[in-house]
């Protein structure tokens, strides 16, 4: 369900804006000055919608339209090809997404939802509130690039640009350009297509640039100001109550992690793979001197847990842990024993092992391989983060993975923020995903989208010699737009239901 607090905040904000606008417009003393103030600043207000328009960028658009005319001509022609392909591809993609949504509604398989290419995004539901800034800034940037392409293409085709503006509808920001309709109707259908499809080239170019930047940030991090120190992993920990990484000897923000048990950690991928390896392999043992073993009877006899595993320490012990080992009773007799030992003292600086032979090969004193006696799927893990002592973790390994947040980058200079590379990478991911999705969705032959004008211009360019009657061409276009609108509306409606109701 949509968070009630977010819904109340949005509704209260828009009600306050609409109430203030209504009071000022109905005021005898302030009405004229208020309306003139709105008009002078290009502002327009309506329920759940505010719009701002200006002509200050018209010279910039004209300057961009004069840069390398041949390159721009080739660019907008390629945008035309991309636009037509995107319009056809968007219909296929929406049909496939609708089939996947219906299949997800009729089955309980969660993997079907993960396979969807397009998903409805609802802030506070399937979009974390902590990443709303990424989403809205990326959405606005994509909209500005979109309209910049329209404006430059229109000026190249001798269509006047009346102005550029931005708007906010409910919570979603966007941008627009106001074109002179008379000039637009006088040019050929091919010229119209170059204008309407210009946004595809701009958005795909933006996707390519952001994706390239992410590749540079990941692969060429040594040339950036954020250089990984010796390929170590910088660990950022978001501490929460009862966090698996919290505690006096736990992990802190800025700690550099170098290993999990005998598994070296050199990056985020190593951290994930090491935890997965530890979760799916038997518990690691440790070489300890035989003289340090403390019999289990000192803390009570060993007892069996409900899952069949053995324990030999008090349930209230926070420093001791039950270990099991094989004790030789003779040449042919070997019996498993249990000992309750102070865990940090016993495993600090010890080697890992799987059998007693591993300890005998690397130790000059009589040592034995002891293994923590834990519940099924529970693991004892030593986390190395020098210069601090090991963090000792007892629990399910995925819990440790979810308890911390990681980055491969360590700032070389103190004034650089630790999270800046993560901010940049996350923002680029949002720009790539949103720009690509909007380039496809906006090309759908649907009323009020660019796909409507792209389809009309395409029909005029291709059917004018086949269907002579203009009204028949418009009727064909109307039914195609009606089908595209119904397809998009079905995807949005079912997508919203799947996100909010379930």
Image: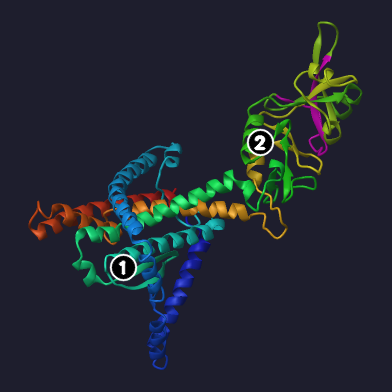
Of residues 192 and 108, the one nearer the viewer is 192
Q: Answer yes or no: do the residues labelled 1 and 2 have beta carbons within 8 Å?
A: no
Where residue 345 appears, as percent x and y from the top left, is 86, 34
Tag of residue 312:
none
Tag of residue 155:
1
Where residue 87 appears, as percent x and y from the top left, is 29, 50
Its colouring scheme is rainbow
Give the total number of marks visible in the rendering: 2
Question: In the rendered view, does 69 fall on the left or right side of 268?
Answer: left
Where residue 98 appears, as percent x and y from the top left, is 33, 44
Please name the residue shown 35% across and 44% down the image. 97
Of residues 290 and 468, the one nearer the viewer is 468
Where residue 474 sits, quadrant-wise, is bottom left
| CA–CA distance in space, label 1 to label 2 | 59 Å
Please give the residue where the numbered disc 2 appears in the rendered image. 397
Q: Which residues are magenta?
A: 309-327
Crowding near the residue tagged with mark 2, few <14, some 14–19, many ≥20 C-alpha atoms within 10 Å = many
Where residue 320 appears, as percent x and y from the top left, is 83, 34
Please name the residue shown 80% across and 17% down the image. 356
Q: Helix or strand or loop: what does disc 2 sit on?
A: helix
In magenta segment, residue 319: yes
In magenta segment, residue 10: no
Please name the residue shown 61% across and 53% down the image. 421
> Is residue 276 positioned above or below 134 on the image?
above
């Amino acid at each position: 369900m949509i968070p009630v607090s977010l819904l109340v905040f949005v509704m209260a904000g828009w009600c306050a804006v609409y109430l203030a606008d209504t009071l000022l417009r109905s005021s005898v003393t302030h009405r004229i000055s208020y309306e003139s103030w709105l008009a002078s600043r290009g502002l327009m207000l309506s329920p759940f919608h505010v719009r701002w328009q200006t002509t200050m960028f018209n010279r910039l658009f004209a300057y961009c339209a004069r840069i390398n005319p041949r390159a721009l001509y080739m660019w907008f022609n390629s945008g035309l090809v991309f636009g037509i392909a995107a319009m056809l591809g968007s219909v296929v993609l929406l049909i496939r997404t609708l089939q996947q949504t219906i299949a997800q509604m009729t089955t309980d398989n969660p993997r079907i939802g993960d396979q969807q290419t397009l998903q409805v995004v609802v802030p506070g539901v399937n979009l974390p509130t902590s990443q709303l800034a990424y989403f809205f800034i990326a959405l606005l940037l994509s909209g500005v690039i979109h309209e910049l392409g329209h404006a430059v293409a229109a000026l190249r085709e001798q269509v006047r640009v009346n102005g550029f503006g931005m708007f906010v509808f409910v919570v979603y920001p966007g941008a627009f350009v106001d074109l002179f309709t008379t000039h637009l109707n006088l040019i050929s259908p091919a010229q119209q297509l170059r204008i309407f499809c210009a946004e595809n080239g701009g958005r795909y170019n933006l996707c390519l640039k952001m994706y390239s930047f992410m590749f540079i940030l990941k692969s060429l991090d040594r040339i950036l100001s954020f250089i990984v120190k010796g390929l170590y992993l910088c660990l950022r920990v978001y501490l929460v109550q009862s966090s698996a990484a919290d505690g006096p000897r736990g992990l802190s923000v800025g700690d550099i992690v170098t290993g999990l048990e005998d598994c070296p950690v050199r990056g985020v991928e190593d951290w994930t793979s090491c935890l997965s390896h530890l979760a799916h392999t038997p518990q690691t043992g440790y070489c300890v001197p035989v003289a340090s073993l403390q019999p289990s009877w000192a803390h009570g006899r060993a007892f069996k847990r409900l899952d069949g595993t053995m324990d030999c320490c008090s349930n209230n012990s926070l420093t001791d842990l039950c270990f099991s080992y094989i004790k030789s009773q003779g040449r042919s007799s070997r019996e498993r024993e249990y000992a309750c030992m102070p865990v940090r003292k016993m495993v600090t600086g010890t080697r890992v092992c799987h059998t007693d032979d591993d300890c005998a090969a690397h130790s000059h004193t009589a040592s034995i391989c002891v293994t923590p006696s834990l519940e099924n799927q529970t693991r004892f893990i030593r986390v190395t983060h020098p210069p601090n002592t090991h963090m000792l973790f007892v629990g399910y390994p995925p819990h440790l993975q979810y308890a911390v947040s990681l980055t491969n980058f360590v700032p070389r200079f103190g004034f650089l923020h630790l999270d800046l590379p993560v901010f940049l990478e996350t923002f680029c991911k949002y720009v790539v995903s949103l720009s690509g999705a909007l380039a496809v969705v906006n090309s759908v032959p649907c009323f009020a989208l660019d796909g409507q004008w792209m389809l009309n211009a395409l029909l005029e360019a291709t059917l004018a010699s086949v269907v002579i009657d203009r009204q028949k061409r418009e009727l064909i276009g109307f039914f195609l737009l009606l089908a595209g609108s119904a397809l998009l509306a079905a995807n949005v409606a079912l997508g919203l239901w799947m996100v909010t109701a379930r």
